[in-house]
Amino acid sequence: MNQTLGQKLLRTKLVDRKAEAGGLAQTMGLFPLTMIGVGATIGTGIFFTMVEAVPKAGPSVILSFLIAAITAGLTALCYAELAFKIPGSGSSYSFAYASVGEFAAFIMAACLLLEYGLAGSATAIGWSAYLNNFLENAFGLQIPEMLRTPMIVSGPNGAEFNPGHINLPPILLVIMCGFLLVRGTRESAATNAAMVLVKLAILVFFVVIAFTGFDANNFTPFFNTDNSKGFGGMAGVTAAAGTVFFSFIGLDTVATAGEEVKDPKRIVPIGILAALGIVTVFYLLVALAAIGAQPAHMFAHQEAGLSVILQNVTGEAWPALVLSAGAVISVFSVTLVTIYGQTRILYAISRDGLIPRTFQKINPRTAAPVSNTVIVCVVVGLVAGLVDSTFLWDMVSMGTLTAFMVVSISVPVMRKRDGGNPIEKGFRVPFGPYLIPGMSVFACLYIIKDLSKTTFTTFAIWMAVAVATYFLYGIRNSKLNHTA
């Protein structure tokens, strides 16, 4: 039967693990899954975006992290219910495909590709500063400036070009992550879990030492009083929340692993909530300790910020050396899991016929999508090596917030489809299908409103490309063309 255009745009697909057997190997349990979520978050908002966020909000950046955490928490509950009902690789994409239809799912996929790809590049870029700090404190060496600065940088008058410059360390980092990922999920998940534990220990180390230099005067005035850039008062808090929000991409990464988890209907919801709890506690502790140890005005343009704080507090180099080493490990972890999430999103989209089959080809020995991983690493590596991270932070937040809103909207849609009665027992969002999802959407919109005009313009262009791709390729090659 021929489908009308409207039917094609709104057709839905429920994920059936048994029907899709023979795909990705189901090897992960709760601990490595939770560590994937923690690894995707801690290491971005703390190690890097403090430099971007504190100049906007001042000491009230603590409220920015709290607002982002509450928003992510509301959405986490929605993720948990949908991950139980739809335990397939693809996360927000799979949720949208099962609820609001194919076209919306493809647009959601475009948001996820933006989110994961640029997050991988942005975190890899931050690796340079901490690696350079580590080499300087450990061996008295520095990476030459031409090999640790990108070609395209943000200047006072917009984008500036530095011919001959390339940020080489992030490229090498992406290559190492790609090597691990093509070896298979079990090896990469185990490596990530070990790195995350090291990272948490390093952050505890920072909090303990930073609190020895705690000065309550650093919290006065609490809000940013400089309104020359529109960041005075709560406007600065919201703007900073938008900058750091992409750090909660970890929740989405947990859901992308649904098809590789042994018992996803039980483990994925628990993993999402566990990762959120761990991340929120660490974010607030580290932010509080950092602001207490260093005045807010010193964060602007500061490289390897947390290491510098420890060196200033103690007057010695060894604490900075230890923290820089931990940050190097941390960013490896973050980049690994974001690239992993990107490849699994592409795998899910390709399996549905909406993009070429290259992205779903599985290596029979490692059960990993090798071609997919290589393509992603090439793109992420090039962006990381050539572009300043200043251009990337808010774009990642825009993609993340959009994905979170679609997930929240999907909850009442799925409840209505079930007739209000769950087909099987499992986690359900409390207080009905509208209150918490509605609060989640409102919170996301509240943060989005203060993102820059450049971010909105770039996002609109990316969406136009996505729409064109869907109508030129996706709608014609969808597997649902053959099941109607």
Image: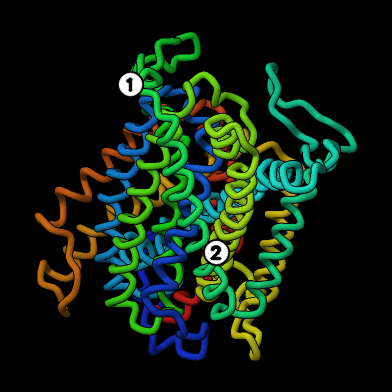
Q: CA distance from mark 1 to mark 2?
A: 36 Å
232 vs 18, nearest the viewer: 232
Q: From where the camera sits, is residue 476 visible?
A: no
Q: Quadrant of residue 275?
A: bottom left
Q: Secondary structure at mark 2?
A: helix
Q: From the image, which quarter does the C terminus lie in? A: bottom left
Left/right of residue 239 with respect to residue 161 in the rendered view: left
SS state under label 1 = helix
Residue 366 seen in this snapshot: yes
Q: Amino acid at mark 1?
A: Met
- Closer to the chain start, of discs 1 and 2, is 2
Residue at numbered disc 2 = 195
In the displayed structure image, the side of residue 276 where residue 109 appears, left or right: right
In the displayed structure, 186 sits above or below 122; it is below
Find disc 1 in the rendering and name its residue: 234
Q: Is residue 377 above or below residue 352?
A: above
> Residue 62: x, y in percent?
35, 33
